[in-house]
Image (cartoon, rainbow, N blue to C red):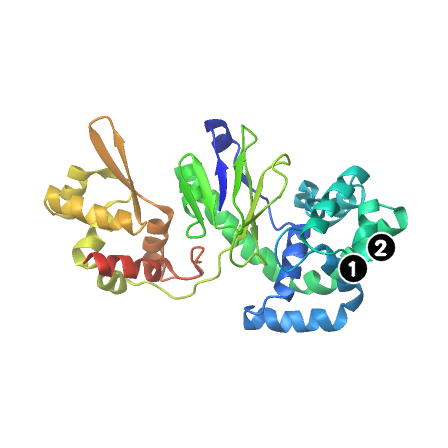
């Protein structure tokens, strides 16, 4: 489990990367090359890369094991500015840091001679590392870059809009199910137990094409905090008003539609034409499904649509044209059906 501890200042400093990070995509795509569960599209990509990329892979794979630790210097903060900026940061990593991080790698698995030489940071070795990263980018990322950019940009536009309209906490809730916001802690499924106290540094969220299941963070908690997470998969299936009513029931669908703009329980009852007790009951079911949030202000309870709830209504309004699903890769309607069915 990865647990990121926030303060109010951290929430104010949490932001999304401006686009895909080519160094993170390089490292995570190396993981995908050895993933037997890769989807068919990436399987074809992997076959081509393994066939044509023997030389860069010979140098890069020993630094990026299939599981567990890989050195943080391979994914520098400068990568958010572009490949060349990130590569320059990799190649100018201080020797003390190279030695330390390659030493951590050596404690988890035997090192090849090449990986050990990277830890020494010699000019010739680092030059070969730079060549391997450039060749790998040209072979593995450049042909795929338009679709990487398209998926990441769609994901970040949706989450930035949620952050702008509803605040950072609501945006963090959109990262479910692999990432869960339990104030003041952001929890993520992770292979080891890690506690990171942000302490006012904020968090950079990086949507990634090649990050396909669990999110990834830097190993060194002293570095600027980063969380790389899977960019959302596309969804082309529309949700019509009739589908919405069948999914939720006519009354509950009316309750959900009545929550545009947010309101109290009594206002919700008036808008939906139901009793206050019925409005409260339906609101509880919709809240459990992640479609609405409820907050208390003094003696008043107010309900508001979550980003998932807004997406579901938007799918209904637009017929699904170009809308994209949440982190599970399914439309909002399908992701709530089981919860709502169980609630009756």
Which residue is pictured at 35% across the width and 62% down the height? 319
Q: Which residue is mark 1?
A: 59
Q: Position of residue 72 (x, y in %)?
A: 68, 45
Q: Position of residue 189 (x, y in %)?
A: 48, 50
Local packing at callout 2 (Cα closer than 10 Å; few below 14, some 14-19, many 20+) is some
In terms of depth relative to the viewer, which is nearer, 149 or 96?
96
Q: Quarter of the image holding residue 162?
A: top left
Q: Horizontally, is 202 left or right of 130 in the view?
A: left
> Dots 2 and 1: beta carbons under 8 Å?
yes
Q: Quarter of the image holding residue 149?
A: bottom right
Q: Horizontally, is 306 left or right of 179 in the view?
A: left
| Badge 2 or badge 1: first in the primary sequence | 1
Say if residue 271 shows up in the picture: no
Q: Horizontally, is 340 left or right of 224 in the view?
A: left
In terms of depth relative to the viewer, which is nearer, 125 or 251?
125
Q: CA distance from mark 2 to mark 1?
A: 8 Å
- Label 2 or label 1, whichever lies nearer to me, is 1
Which residue is pictured at 14% across the width and 42% down the height? 270
Secondary element under disc 1, as helix, strand or loop, is helix
Q: Which residue is mark 2?
A: 128
Which residue is pictured at 59% across the width and 44% down the height? 18
Image quadrant holding the C terminus, namely bottom left
Q: Position of residue 129 (x, y in %)?
A: 81, 53
Marker disc for residue 167? none
Q: Position of residue 193 (x, y in %)?
A: 52, 45
């Amino acid at each position: 489990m990865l647990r990121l501890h926030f303060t109010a200042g951290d929430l104010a400093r949490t932001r999304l990367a401006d686009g895909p990070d080519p160094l993170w995509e390089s490292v995570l795509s190396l993981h995908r090359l050895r993933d037997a569960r890769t989807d068919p599209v990436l399987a074809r990509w992997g076959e081509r890369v393994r066939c044509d990329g023997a030389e860069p892979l010979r140098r890069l794979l020993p630094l990026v094991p299939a599981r567990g630790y890989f050195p943080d210097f391979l994914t520098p903060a400068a990568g958010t500015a572009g490949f060349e900026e990130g590569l320059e940061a990799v190649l100018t990593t201080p020797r003390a840091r190279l030695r330390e991080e390659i030493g951590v790698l050596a404690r988890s698995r035997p090192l090849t001679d090449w990986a050990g030489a990277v830890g020494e940071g010699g000019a010739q070795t680092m030059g070969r590392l730079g060549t391997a990263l450039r060749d790998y980018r040209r072979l593995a990322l450049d042909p795929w870059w338009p679709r990487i950019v398209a998926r990441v940009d769609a994901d970040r536009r949706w989450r930035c809009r949620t952050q702008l309209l509803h605040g950072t906490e609501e945006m963090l809730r959109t990262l479910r199910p692999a990432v869960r916001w339990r104030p003041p802690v952001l929890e993520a499924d992770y292979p080891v137990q890690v506690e990171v106290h942000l302490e006012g540094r904020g968090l950079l969220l990086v949507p990634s094409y090649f990050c396909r299941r669990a999110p990834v963070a830097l190993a060194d908690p002293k570095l600027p905090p980063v969380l790389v997470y899977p960019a959302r998969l596309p969804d082309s299936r529309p949700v019509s008003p009739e589908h919405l009513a069948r999914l939720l029931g006519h009354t509950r669908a009316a309750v959900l539609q009545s929550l545009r703009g947010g309101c109290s329980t009594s206002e919700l009852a008036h808008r939906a034409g139901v009793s206050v007790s019925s409005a409260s009951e339906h609101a509880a079911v919709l809240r459990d499904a992640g479609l609405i949030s409820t907050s208390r202000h003094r003696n008043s309870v107010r309900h508001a649509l979550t980003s998932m709830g807004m997406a579901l209504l938007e799918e209904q309004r637009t017929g699904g044209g170009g809308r994209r699903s949440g982190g599970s890769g399914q439309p909002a309607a399908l992701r709530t059906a089981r919860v709502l069915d169980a609630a009756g």
